[in-house]
Image (cartoon, rainbow, N blue to C red):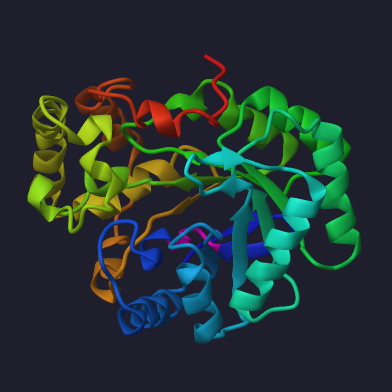
């Protein structure tokens, strides 16, 4: 697999998002998750991305049991699960969460530690100071922010250089193009794109609501996956599927190739619960003509419905 820069490390250009190991998209089990991690490593994936709230620690425990140290490992804190859900970026809370994560991950440090959501009640200089101290103490290799604005990135980076910024980015979620991708590129910060396959919308077969495997699957209430938006989105994506089929390409691999083509500093982290899906992510190289045709088929802003429900947008920084 080709490599991309993440701080001082070189990682595979595609990483693995481990949210689904915690059951966020339906029931799973430890053995299946461990097989997926083995398959990812065999495929050249060297960045594994998790968080303390994924299954309330289940995802981290699975990765800790897997035990490989020849990877770059990222986890996150900052969201207080609730109910009601809230955020906390105070130093005592961050330190307590980090110790719990390290115990589950069976590590004495983590390579990359994200603030999962920005707490507006904690000044950015206080937050940067906390993360700087954790770096100096050797508890974390670098730090990152998630779902933040370009202005926050510039302010934070000036105080304590950021390794990565993680926001949602895919063919149907293009907000980072309005300043965030450019800001990260100018500052030498890796942009880690989560949900690059649109939470299954750009899988190799059209998604159906009956595919949502449990009541805990948050797509049941996600605006883009409820009617009439779901039918409208499936219809909009159908020509893209035809485009891929005519060329003999996997839909998922094509969608990931599009994300990769938007900048050398971008690292997508698709997620899966199973080893089988990993084979669907590579094998497509896009020409400028291909990219122009994809942009014609799926222009920016084509999606019906917001990417989150109102309750999930409460702590996402909005800047446009």
Residue projecting furthest to the front: 83
Q: Residue at x 39, y 82 (%)?
A: 34
Tell me if residue 308 can be seen. Answer: yes
Which picture quadrant has residue 295? top left
Q: Is residue 201 above or below residue 105?
A: above
Q: In the image, residue 18 lies at what x, y percent?
A: 44, 63
Q: Is residue 270 left or right of residue 280?
A: right
Q: Nearer the viewer, residue 8 or 115?
A: 115
Classify residue 281 by image quadrant. bottom left
Residue 216 image point, x, y percent: 28, 53
Q: How far across and how far down the image is residue 46, in percent?
A: 54, 70
Query: Residue reaching furthest top?
Result: 320
Q: Is residue 65 magenta?
A: no
In the rendered view, would you say 216 is above or below 156?
Answer: below
Q: 33 left or right of 7?
A: left
The x, y position of residue 189, in whole percent, is: 69, 43
Q: Is residue 142 visible?
A: no
In magenta, the rendered stretch is 12-18
Q: Along the horizontal axis of the image, is 236 left or right of 188?
A: left
85, 144: nearer the viewer: 85
Q: Is 213 placed left or right of 140 in the picture?
A: left
Q: Residue at x 16, y 30 (%)?
A: 233
Q: Residue at x 29, y 57 (%)?
A: 25
Residue 16 highlighted magenta (yes or no): yes
């Amino acid at each position: 697999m080709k490599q991309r820069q993440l701080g001082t490390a070189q990682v595979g250009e595609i990483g693995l998002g481990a949210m689904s190991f915690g059951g966020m998209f339906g029931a799973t089990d430890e053995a299946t998750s461990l097989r997926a991690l083995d398959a990812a490593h065999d495929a050249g994936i060297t960045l594994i991305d998790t968080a303390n709230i994924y299954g309330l620690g289940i995802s981290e425990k699975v990765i800790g049991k897997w035990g490989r140290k020849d990877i770059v490992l990222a986890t996150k804190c900052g969201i207080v699960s609730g109910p009601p859900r809230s955020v906390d970026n105070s130093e005592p809370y961050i330190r307590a969460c980090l110790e719990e994560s390290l115990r589950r991950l069976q590590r004495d440090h983590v390579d990359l530690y994200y603030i999962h959501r920005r707490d507006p009640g904690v000044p950015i200089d206080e937050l940067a100071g906390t993360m700087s101290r954790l770096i100096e103490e050797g508890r974390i290799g670098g730090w990152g922010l998630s779902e933040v604005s370009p202005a926050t990135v510039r302010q934070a980076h000036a105080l304590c250089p950021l390794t990565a910024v993680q926001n949602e980015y895919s063919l149907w979620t293009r907000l980072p193009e309005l300043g965030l991708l450019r800001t990260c590129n100018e500052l030498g910060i890796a942009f880690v794109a989560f949900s690059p396959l649109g939470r299954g919308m750009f899988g190799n077969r059209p998604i159906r609501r009956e595919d949502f495997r449990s009541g805990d699957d948050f797509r049941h209430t996600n605006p883009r996956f409820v009617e009439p938006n779901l039918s409208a989105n499936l219809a909009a994506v159908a020509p893209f599927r035809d485009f891929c089929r005519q060329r003999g390409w996997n839909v998922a691999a094509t969608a990931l190739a599009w994300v990769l083509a938007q900048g050398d500093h971008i690292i997508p982290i698709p997620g899966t619960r199973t080893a089988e899906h990993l084979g669907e992510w590579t094998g497509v190289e896009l020409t400028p003509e291909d990219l122009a045709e994809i942009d014609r088929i799926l222009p920016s802003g084509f999606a019906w419905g917001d990417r989150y429900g109102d309750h999930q947008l409460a702590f996402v920084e909005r800047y446009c």
